[in-house]
Image (cartoon, grey):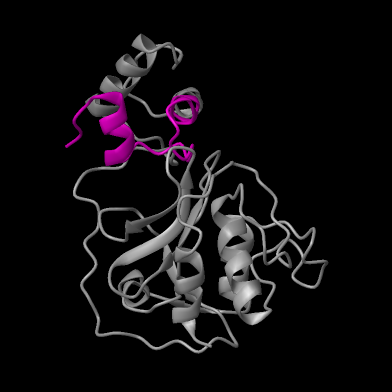
């Protein structure tokens, strides 16, 4: 068994439903959803290798152990091996992680080793195949006890636009103002238009994303901007 087997198992579940906050019994081989992103990846690893990982308690009951992006980040630093996103992009079964920022929802995907992913993405597409490039990621992760067979490195292409999100200090831009104007027109209150991406704008973005079936991570990337009908630089 290698990282490739994780990808093969994940691909068998493409099309199954997504639910933010879903809890998945890691020891149930017949489970078909709903999934969220961290629960899906932890389930794949448990089913393939019997490893409970990325959970609030990795020594707990796989039936009830809960997973979070912060738990995956914790285990990456304490137990696993952190690699670059570029390395993960070329390694079947490697995990690619975006850590949750303040008030945000993180995200996690499994690399297919050829620039693609299998992941629990959002309520529109559920479990889906996507791509690594053009998205914001924090790290790649390899799990101890798993055999990985990396392909030749493929250059990672980061996002070509600014991704607006809650940061410290706050992001300030006329693009943020355009996001706020559009959100307010659609009925999602940003508490005015001040060109500052603050907590109220974050809440409005998440509510909008959830309303259109996107992963409510609170970040305005190309996908969310397209759903809003605006162009970002």
23 left or right of 91? Answer: right
Give the residue drawn at x 79%, y 58%.
Answer: 64
36 left or right of 66? Answer: left
Q: Position of residue 58 (x, y in %)?
A: 74, 70
Q: Position of residue 37 (x, y in %)?
A: 54, 53
Q: In terms of depth relative to the viewer, which is nearer, 73 or 226? A: 226
Q: Position of residue 19 (x, y in %)?
A: 59, 41
Please tell me how many numbered marks the rendered image carries: 0
Q: Position of residue 120 (x, y in %)?
A: 49, 52
Q: Quadrant of residue 134?
A: bottom left
Question: Magenta residues, as a range?
Answer: 205-233
Residue 80 in magenta stretch: no
Q: Is residue 54 above or below residue 214?
A: below
Q: Is residue 95 above or below residue 233?
A: below
Q: Residue furthest right?
A: 61
Give the residue drawn at x 63%, y 55%.
Answer: 68
Q: Quadrant of residue 226?
A: top left
* Quadrant of the image containing the C terminus: top left
Residue 225 in magenta stretch: yes
Give the residue drawn at x 46%, y 13%.
Answer: 191
Q: Is residue 143 above or below residue 198?
A: below
């Amino acid at each position: 068994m290698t990282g490739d087997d994780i990808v093969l198992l994940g691909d068998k579940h493409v099309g199954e439903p997504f639910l933010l906050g879903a809890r998945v019994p890691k020891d149930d081989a017949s489970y078909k959803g709903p999934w969220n992103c961290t629960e899906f990846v932890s389930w794949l690893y448990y089913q393939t290798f019997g490893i409970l990982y990325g959970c609030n308690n990795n020594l707990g009951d796989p039936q009830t152990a809960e997973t979070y992006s912060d738990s995956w980040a914790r285990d990456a630093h304490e137990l696993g091996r952190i690699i670059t996103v570029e390395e993960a992009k070329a390694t079947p079964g490697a995990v690619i992680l975006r850590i949750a920022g303040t008030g945000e929802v993180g995200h996690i995907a499994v690399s297919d080793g050829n620039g693609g992913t299998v992941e629990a993405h959002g309520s529109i597409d559920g479990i889906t195949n996507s791509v690594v490039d053009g998205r914001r990621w924090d790290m790649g992760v390899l799990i101890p006890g798993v055999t990985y067979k990396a392909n030749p490195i493929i250059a990672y292409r980061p996002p070509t636009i600014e991704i607006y999100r809650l940061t410290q200090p706050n992001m300030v831009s006329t693009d943020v103002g355009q996001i706020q104007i559009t959100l307010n027109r659609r009925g999602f209150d940003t508490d005015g238009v001040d060109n500052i991406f603050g907590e109220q704008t974050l809440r409005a973005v998440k509510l909008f994303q959830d309303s259109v079936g996107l992963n409510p991570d609170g970040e305005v990337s190309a996908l969310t901007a397209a759903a809003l009908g605006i162009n970002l630089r």
